[in-house]
Structure formats: C-alpha cells, structure tokens
Amino acid sequence: MKLQTRYTDISELLAIKDMPSAVAEPQLLLFNDKLADNFAIKHDSEFLAKLLSGSTIDNDVAPVALGYSGHQFGHFSPRLGDGRAHLLGAIADKDGTLWDLQLKGAGATVFSRGGDGRCAIGPAVREYIMSEALHALGIATTRCLAVVTTGETVYRQPPRPGAVVTRLAKSHIRVGSFQYLATQGDIEGLEKLVDYAISCHYPGISSTGEQRYIEFLTAVLDKQIELVISWMRIGFIHGVMNTDNTLISGETIDYGPCAMMNQFDLDTVFSSIDHQGRYAFGNQPNIANWNIARLAESLIPLFADQESAVEQLSPVVNGFAAKFNDAFNTMWQQKLGLAGQHEGDHALVSELLGLMKQHQLDYTNTFNALTESLLADFAIPTSLKEWHKKWNVRISSKSYETMRAVNPAVIPRNHTIEMILAEYEASGESSLKDAFLEAFNDPYVYDERQFEWLQAPKDYDKNYQTFCGT
C-alpha cells in the first residue's frame, strides 16, 4: 500500500504531524473487499489490522491531524480539528485519483482537548454499514475500508469495546477548513487551499483572480444542493450539518446522529442533542445555504476590497434558494413519474405530502407502492385513493422506469441498524449484517423476498434517538 503526503504544503496550521497510538490486540473485524480491489489492497488480515489500527506506521509518510473550525449548532468554535482522527496519507485508486486514508479512533491528537481519541465498536460499525448503504443508493459519500477492534475498552456510558474506522474520502477539505485559516489570518494558506480544492474537485475552473473564488463558491454551492436533494429523495437525515461536517467535495461525512425517516414529516428529528430541530429533515436545505454563506465569509480576505467581495459573493449565496427549488421540484417530478410539466403539479405534490403527514404514512413504502402499482395490482394506502385518481392522469408509459430509478425499495432502517450494532457490541459479530448488506446489491429493485428489510418498525421509531459517535 503506497501512501503519499497531502495538505502539508498548504499551511503549517492545516496539517500537523501526529502519531496514532498503538492498541493492545488489533483484529480485523470488517473489511470492504470490493472497495479494496479499487486500490489494489490485498486482504492480509494481520498486516491490515496493525496498519489500520495505527499500531504500524508507514515510515515514509508522516501521519497528520487536520485543523479546522466549525459552527456547531450555530455556535462558532475557532479551533476544532481532528480530535480522534489521523490522516495516514493519500492513496491512488486504479484511475489514479488520490483519496485520503484516515483512521478514526486511533488515539488523542493535538486537537483532542482532553479527550481519549478513541472510538467504540458501535459507532465504528454504524459508519461502515451506513456509508455502504448510501453508496449503494447512489448518494455521494465517504467510504469505509475497514473496522479494526482494539482489544481495549472505551470508557463511555456504558463502557464499550474499542474499534478504529478506516475512512476513504476524495478529500477532507471542509467549510471549516477555510474558516480555520481565515480565522488564523493565514491568507497565503487560504489561497493555496482554494487552489488545492479546485484541483481536486473542480478542475474545470480555469479563471484567475477574484473570479476564480466566485466560480469556486458557485461550484461548491451546486454540489451541496445536489447532495441535500439526494438525501431528501431517500429520506436521509444527516443530523449534524455543522460547517466542520460539510465537505467541499459534496460527499456525506460523519454518520453519528444520522437516521432514516419513516413516517413522512418535514420536522422529523432523531438526534438527541438537536433540541431545536436545527437539522430536521426539512430544514437541511436552509442549513446547507447557511453553511455556504459561512464559506463565502471565509473567502472575503482573498479579495482586494472587502466591500467589493461582499457585492460579488452575495449573489452566489442568495441564488441558493432558486437553484434548490428548481432541483427540489424536479426531484418530486421524478419520484412521481410526472409526464412533462403541468401547472397543477405543485398542488398535486403538496396534497400528497399533506395526506402522508396527516395519515402518518411511511415515506419509502408509500413511494415504492406508487411505483409498483404501475406494473401490478399493488396495495395503495386507502387514504390516497382519491389522490391516486388525479395522479393517474399525469403519468405516462415511461413513469415506472423514471420512478423505479429514484424510489428505493430498501433503505437502512434505523431499527435494523440498531439490531446489527447491538449484536456487534454484545458478541463482536452479527448474524444480520451480511444479509442486510446483500439487500443493497440493488436497493431500487422491489423483491418481496426481502420482506424483512422492507418493513418499517411497528412503533415507527417513536422514541428513537441517535447520538454523536464520540
């Protein structure tokens, strides 16, 4: 496994050399063979367990902890950084594209602020399962290469077995990365970070000067819209959309408090610490827009004149709503297989969503039922019978193909994820995991033999809560 250095040439503040801490008994628990093949990584359990726990280090590349700021639930923390993560370096896939190889839970860093830098087995497995499910559903996401158990206890409430997650990402450049360098007054580093982010993620941007920063902000905004639309299409709630969890690449990162919506309600929240619903399902677009505004603020120091910077960047930020609404309307049009555009479509969608909320209908299963009803006598909720007649007027011979491509039959249901995590925490293995992940070989194909994974929980997760993975 050949690693390369990354970020150290941008700013001495951004990437700080920091060694992982060796663990007592590293053992490879989960390994993503398909993902590993794309990087020509051989499945050598003993070697990988030591490397991916931080117990063995490639002496040619120094591990680093990355610095970044973050608006956490709206409150600014100027110096967060990787408090329990070590970037081992970058690794190239078969196409030559570089990916960050990062360990989560490999010990304390200079950014730990008194924490132990460790991770429990539950959050580690959760990231593996959820990121693989979202990838299968076609959602842009970081990937999980492996989970290694440490043979040590992580002292949380209650104490848990320890583990280390290996995350692969196109980069770990966050909105908070720009906030960090701007706050530190490192203008040279800030400019280098923009150039590096463009080279990694938006190489089509060829302009120079201040126009380059405007085009960069626009590109990031477009990617964030694309990401949030994809989340809402499948009913995903990120749960902690802080600026430090917003990747410039437009990939999903941090699976701690995330959850899937069952009954349709735009106000759905599962995170135990989101008391105000800041990151509720329906509020995710507003927060994405807010985060983009924070990125714009961080770019202001790169302009020759601050007033001019605001005048040039503000139209980009203010254009979020119109762009998002266009994409949002297209999403509903696809989910319902509507033929062309009709002036009554907005009312048709609004009526459906109102009925779904009123009758507490399951989001995934309702759209799946509508999709399958185009091919067979599939049961439609009684509460939608009259609406169904209006909808039938708007569909076409191509509606099934359109709807089946965007409406999943299988999603990573919260109660199923919790059962898998409970098994791992209790015994270090799971009888459900393999069958569950197999269902995501083609999650958009309805198969009644997958009944176990298709059903919503009986209580619709009434008292379900998610927690940060620390």
Image (tube, rainbow, N blue to C red):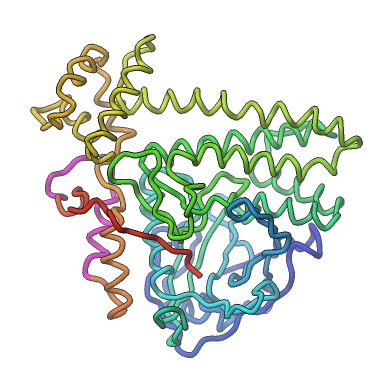
Q: Residue at x 35, y 17 (%)?
A: 347
Say whether residue 180 is visible. yes
* Relative horizontal placement of residue 189, taking residue 265 as reference (left or right): right
Give the residue furthest to the right: 304
Give the residue furthest to the bottom: 24
Is residue 133 located in the magenta-colored stretch of the structure?
A: no
* Relative horizontal placement of residue 81, taking residue 328 as reference (left or right): right
Q: Nearer the viewer, residue 170 or 296?
A: 296
Location of residue 327 in the rendering, given as x and y in whole percent from the top left corner: 48, 26
Residue 230's quadrant in the figure? top left
Q: Residue at x 38, y 53 (%)?
A: 259
Say whether residue 96 is visible. no
- Magenta-drawn stretch, dominant element (helix, strand or loop): helix
Location of residue 152 in the rendering, given as x and y in whole percent from the top left corner: 45, 87
* Relative horizontal placement of residue 90, taking residue 41 as reference (left or right): right
Magenta highlight range: 431-450
Quick check: 250 above or below 55? above
Is residue 446 located in the magenta-colored stretch of the structure?
A: yes
Q: Residue at x 31, y 29 (%)?
A: 353
Q: Residue at x 66, y 56 (%)?
A: 70
Residue 415's quadrant in the figure? bottom left
Q: Nearer the viewer, residue 14 or 258?
A: 258
Q: Nearer the viewer, residue 60 or 141?
A: 141
In the picture, the quarter occupied by the N terminus is bottom right
Location of residue 375 in the rendering, given as x and y in whole percent from the top left corner: 14, 26
